[in-house]
Amino acid sequence: MSDYENYLKGSPLEVKVITRRMGIPNSASIDVFLQNDGYQALAKALSMKPDEVINEVKNSGLRGRGGAGFNTGMKWSFVPKQSAKPKYVVCNADESEPGTCKDRPLIEFDPHQLIEGIAIAGYAIQSSQGYIYVRGEYRYLLDILDRALQEAYAHGYLGKNILGSGFNYDIATHTGAGAYECGEETALLNSLEGLRGYPRVKPPFPAVVGLYGGPTVVNNVETLSNVPSIILKGAEWYSKLGSPKNGGTRLFCLSGHINRPGVYELPMGFPLRRIIEEVGGGIPGGKKLKCVIPGGSSCPVLLPEEIDVPMDFDSLAKIGSMLGSGGVVVMDEDTCVVKAALRISKFYAHESCGWCIPCREGTSWLKNLLTRLHAGAGVAEDPDTALDVAFNILGKTLCPLGDAAALPVISMLKKFRHEFEEHVKLGACPYEKRMVGVGH
Amino acid sequence: MLSESLKAKFDQVIARYPLKRSAIVPLLMFGQDEIGHVSDELIQEIARAVEVRPIEVIEDISYYSMLHRQPIGKYNFQVCTNISCLLRGGEAMLEHCSKKLGIGHKQTTADGKFSLEEVECLGACCGAPAMQVNYDFYENLTPEKIDALIEKLNKNGSA
């Protein structure tokens, strides 16, 4: 189990929608859930027409919290009304983007909110089966979800003829076994079908041809956890919590060189500077900021002069980065950017599934180049060679893992070129002694 | 022979899917939890249970990082050194575990009690530096916390 304190320190600046039950003792139990508006949204949704549910979610401005930021209601609306094959809702709880740890509190402290969201999504697209794909490392969450599902069945919120509506819905959990790539929706579907987690060619998109060939909605844990509140309080209320076209709140996972690391629920569009300085309490030791990853390791880094950006999908895209998965990783002035780039590259080289050659080869070459650069054994051309390799991965792969590997490295090479050159010139890492706790 | 409870679990998991082979990875995980690694027998049993050839099970095993074909230690230390942990001393924690246990990445102590692995992001970024021992999370690690844990696990009898 996670240490509650680590994740939910709380901040007066938070706007609690999907975290509002966290902190209530036993918040994962169905009794506490029912005492706090639990399953009322499902009852309300079942009294609406499926299309009305989809429109409500569409109008709320809820966008995919896994990283892509696509309008959730829109995604649901792509599912054909008539289908010869069964339709599915798949909840992506294969959280693995470095810097991201929000599925853990969402499932650990409020599993029924997620289950309710999945059931509502199932009703909206007229599916009768949902799956929750949980990353293998999160075994304790699998157990929590299995218990919560049993409770939901026992209380009649899942199963046959839910609340007398005639709607039947089943949800089952599924465990992964360690693979970042399975967080990509088509790779996840292959994995769920018992295959290696290779991505599929799109189109067709999962909404049309997904799990077992049936129309499938794949949504992130945070996305689905927002659905009950939207149904209960309305699209207009939800959309007004955020910034234009970016409805609601967002969980930000604040980590790295920050005084109060934790998961915080803040309105969409909340400025990054205030997240670091006010919510997170600034950088330990009064050190200066060097750069920050705004949304998980696949996002281009931002410089100190760029952090007045409102944290929503469109504002970050405008300055060449991404809101991604909400993982804000802060790096202080003593951080070796070459080391950070190397560690991120090592990750993508390890996780590349090998299906697309530019990614399979490129990620390893990036890792190798950055290894020798960091060790001080690089040559003057290495930064340009690394850029060339990165640009030959970018946009040339079936799934976004290739871009995820290329983008952060490109941003670091462009914004901190002098640091890469300094390593070559010195023949050593100038930060080796300064960077906190790095073993060599 | 697989235990009766594991066989019952297999049946229950397989019933969740319209296509039996969907259960391969969960069965490998639950089987490994009981046996300690993915044995040849486990592969055969799963292949039979989900009606695929054993090679199709093996194809899955080589894809996923948490499945082990060889026995590993009773306590598998999985230390994260990815970006959030790196910034808060993850590499030093890995090095400390390595020195203390006298083993390196993907090695097991001679008594079969401990294994060590450098792993990718565990989703414990706000509690960095972090590790998992088997499925249990240990966060905000310090060398002292690691020492105390190893001492405690050592007292838990032999593997």
Image: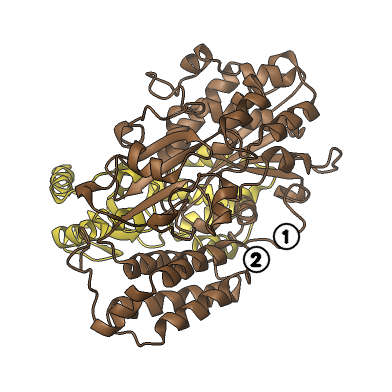
Q: Tell me what residue is drawn at x 72 percent, y 25 percent.
A: A168
Image marks 1 and 2: residues in contact by CB distance under 8 Å: yes
- Tint of chain A: brown
Dividing the picture into quadrants, the one containing residue A291 is bottom left
User: Which is nearer the eye, A352 or A306?
Assistant: A306
- Classed neighbour count for the residue bearing mark 2: other residues with Cα under 10 Å, few (<14), some (14–19), many (≥20): some
- Can you give x and y, in whole percent of width and height, for residue A109 in the image? 43, 28
Look at mark 1 in the image and give the residue it sits on.
A202
Q: Colour of chain B?
A: yellow
Q: Tell me: A219 left or right of B61.
A: right
Question: Relative to A253, is A437 on the left or the right?
Answer: left
State how far apart marks 1 and 2 are (Cα): 8 Å
Who comes first in sequence, dot 1 or dot 2?
1
- Packing grade of label 1 (10 A; few <14, some 14-19, many >=20) is few
Residue A157: x %, y % from top left: 63, 20
Position in image of residue A372 (x %, y %): 33, 80
Label 2 marks which chain's residue?
A
Name the residue carrying label 2. Answer: A398
User: Residue A57, relative to residue A389: is it above or below?
Assistant: above
Disc 1 marks a residue whose amino acid type is Lys
Front residue of A162 and A26 = A26
Could one spot residue B91 in this view of the protein?
A: yes
Q: Residue drawn 61% across and 72% down?
A: A356
Residue A70, image x and y in percent?
A: 66, 46
In-image side of A116 versus A428 (left or right): right
| Quadrant location, the C terminus of chain A | bottom left
**At 64% from the left edge and 55% from the top edge, which residue is drawn?**
A190
Left/right placement of residue A333 relative to residue A137 reads left
Q: For numbered disc 2, what is the local secondary structure?
A: loop
Q: Is residue A156 visible?
A: no
Examine the rendered structure and indicate whether residue A151 appears above or below residue A423.
above
- What amino acid is labelled 2 in the image? Leu
